[in-house]
Amino acid sequence: MDKYKRLLVTAALPYANGPLHIGHVAGCYLPADIYSRYQRAQKRDIKFIGGSDEHGVPITIRAMKEGITPQQVVDKYHEMIKESLFGMGISFDIYSRTSNKIHHQTASDFFKKMYDDGLFEEKETEQFYDEKAKVFLADRYITGTCPVCGNPNAYGDQCEKCGSSLSPEQLINPKSTLSDAVPVKRKTKHWYFPLQEYEPWLKQWVLEEHKEWKNNVYGQCKSWLDNGLQSRAMTRDSNWGVKVPLPDAEGKVLYVW
């Protein structure tokens, strides 16, 4: 520990889509707080930093259902979560939020630097779209009848009755959970990070150099690497979030930050 002159402690960002749950505190913020308090007691230079996660599809959907703006949703729950954390004595040095201007600017700068360095793949794909709600749909927001067991309430990614992994194309009589409209396919362009190009050194770094990680963490990473890494989308279709800083990216935001 003495080889580190300064320590930064972070914890998972609570999602500003509802109130804090006691399980979040016990499993995440309390252990981080105990560690931070111990380091302060040892007179070490430490900062414990957290904040509210305020972007993503669930927030836009909650706003839509309640007839308010996404900003109103996150303003409400950010304050509620912050009061809960500090009320329980969680000793953050900084508790911020991802809707802050400095966060938007920093995330945008990272994306633009990587784009200028030619690190992204640009792809046009077809995705499901709700013409009534006028939004692209994540698989979880499409329901229909499971082709395996006949469950009428299966999701576009999984049937929770029989456990089958699904895709929206497999559902019988699919519909949007936002409007009950039948989703249609639309073309959309996004920027992807080619993880497969970094697979060799990631295998070395994870599988050979970090065997001290917890078994479940190590095992999950090993599973991804063993199955072969794939390109991951860095952007999504939405008007809520950090806007993609490119001239041909209207209606696109960074995924997730």
Image (cartoon, helix red, strand yellow):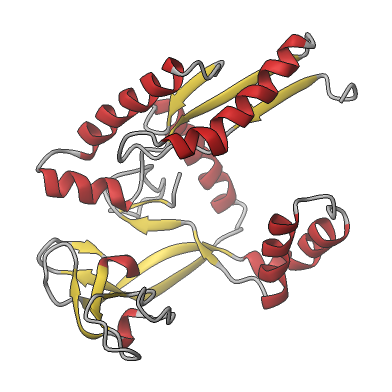
Camera-side residue: 115 or 175?
175
| Location of residue 226 in the rendering, given as x and y in whole percent from the top left corner | 72, 75
Residue 33 at what x, y percent from top left? 61, 23
Q: Position of residue 169 (x, y in %)?
A: 31, 85
Q: Which residue is located at x 76 percent, y 60 percent?
A: 202
Q: Nearer the viewer, residue 143 or 234?
A: 143
Relative to residue 141, is residue 158 drawn left or right? right
Q: Residue at x 52, y 18 (%)?
A: 94
Within the image, what quadrant is residue 173 found in?
bottom left
Q: Which residue lies at the image location 31% right of the left edge and 52% below the top edge?
A: 57
Q: Is residue 182 above or below residue 231?
A: below
Q: Residue at x 11, y 72 (%)?
A: 181
The residue closer to the viewer here, 107 or 7, is 7
Which residue occupies the extreme bottom position in the image? 148
Residue 217, image quadrant = bottom right
- Left or right relative to 124: residue 178: left
Between 153 and 47, the residue placed more toward the observer is 153
Residue 254, position as x, y percentages in the image: 42, 49
Quadrant location of the N terminus? Answer: top right
